[in-house]
Amino acid sequence: MPNRFPQNFLWGGAIAANQVEGAYLEDGKGLSTADVVGYVPPEERGSLDELLSMNHAKLDEAIHTPGTDQYPKRRGIDFYHRYKEDIALMAEMGFTTFRLSISWPRIFPNGDELEPNEAGLAFYDQVFDELHKYGIEPLVTISHYEMPVMLTTKYNGWASRELIDLYLKYAETLFMRYHSKVKYWLTFNEINCTLKAPFLGAGILTEGLDHPRQTAFQGLHHQFVASALAVRALRRIDPGAQIGAMLARKLLYPYSCHPGDVLQAQSENQMALFCSDVQVRGEYPTFINRVWEREQVHVEFHREDKKILREHTVDFLSFSYYMSSAVSVDPQISELTEGNLSTGLKNPYLDTSEWGWQIDPIGLRVALREMYDRYRVPLFVVENGLGAADTVEEDGSINDDYRISYLARHIEQMAEAIADGVDLMGYTSWGPIDLISASTSEMRKRYGFIYVDQDDQGRGTLARSRKKSFYWYKKVIASNGEDLSQD
Ligand code: BG6
């Protein structure tokens, strides 16, 4: 059989510090913006927007409430103490890469100290050494949905331009320390999420602001400049390394062939790609001017900003892909379903996950072709997977055929996209080990090949066990993506 994936294709999984590490105040770590997000039981949850929002009162209460009880991201899955066992399991599956993020408040507890926290730096040295022991290449996200909470209370997060220098200092500290151990970097996780969820993506509290959209766009601009300056710094410190942007790519389809639906889908897809336009092409797209005009947004640029964005574009574009959604101008079409940080129209041709996310493997091929056509830089699928509630059988086995089916169909479409001419560097499925959900803070919503014995309330032994998908993924990697069969 011809090999459809390149020989050097990177296979692995992706996690984020705030969803796995726990040890939320250990070894000098400061409180993060993820540590203050409380658990809300499903029956009390309002809309997704409410779930993702933060206000001053909630924040203040969380900062003054010690312990992990109501705040699952403070406990994670105890990766901080169990990383050796966890990495050994990833190695057993044959991972050649592992995407993880660094906890900013482990390195700079408040975000604006003069010197980094040595214990925090030492922790990631050990993690990277452990990965290299098994020949696993780390892919490191510098900022994945967390920052020192002090940066919110003192500066309102990325709303303030001061964050650029603080981030740059943090990024340079990482590049100087780890240049011999890390060859692949990502500047911000799902940077486009700042517009949808300013607290999650940028530590910004919009409560009480005159013009929240203005602040979100301004915060995003600060992130663009910081990202470009990090690119510049890495090229100086470690010219052999590569650095990428990272987007949440939720594909939007026109619900019908009505030209109005097509136009709306196009507009929303343009917005979904506007961040990569800036980070890959080095300039804001022209369509954004009309959006700003309509929303009365005036983004403030400093004199050098355009030059910085133009001169320091990323080497590759990575993205998460879980699902697609549809849009319509017809008010009669109104059945909604949940999605990754968004709610959208239900597509009658697609099944949904238990959490309402629409499963669309072909959409991944569409997204890959579209992005490669648009940018002509290597792409990297750094998140993809199925959040599902698993059942542990009496004999301890977990038969997650639904997850195998989801992943197999998506990997199949990646192979098709490569055959279509797309330059794809690798694939890291989301949450190879069960972890705390970013949006709902649940443990019940599991993505892993490795099961973790813990429930939403934090009860359980934290023991790790292999699901059926563990053996399946091992076989996929061993065959370089050729054997996707499900027995
Ligand atoms: C992505 C995030 O949006 O989706 C991850 O980068 C997140 O952090 C993943 O966990 C899945 O979303 P959720 O809400 O199911 O955890």
Image (cartoon, helix red, strand yellow):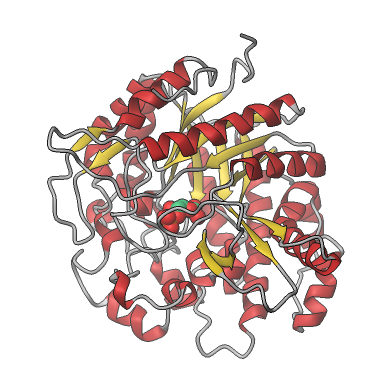
Residue 104 in sight:
no
Q: Quadrant of the N terminus?
A: top right
Residue 329 in sight:
yes
Q: Residue at x 55, y 65 (%)?
A: 342
Left or right of 366, for residue 118: left
**Residue 188: x percent and y percent?**
56, 53
Q: Residue at x 85, y 65 (%)?
A: 259
Q: Residue furthest top?
A: 1
Left or right of 347, for residue 447: left
Numbered disc total = 0
Between 437 and 387, the one nearer to me in the picture: 387
Between 19 and 353, the one nearer to me in the picture: 353
Q: Residue at x 33, y 37 (%)?
A: 400
Name above or below for residue 367 compared with residue 329. Answer: above
Q: Residue at x 50, y 27 (%)?
A: 11
Left or right of 124, for residue 412: right
**Residue 186: x percent and y percent?**
57, 44
Left or right of 26, for residue 10: right
Q: Quadrant of the C terminus?
A: top left
Between 126 and 316, the one nearer to me in the picture: 316
**Residue 67: x percent and y percent?**
18, 66
Name above or below for residue 321 compared with residue 472. Answer: below
**Residue 99: x percent and y percent?**
46, 38
Between 171 and 467, the one nearer to me in the picture: 467
Which quarter of the picture shows residue 115?
A: bottom left
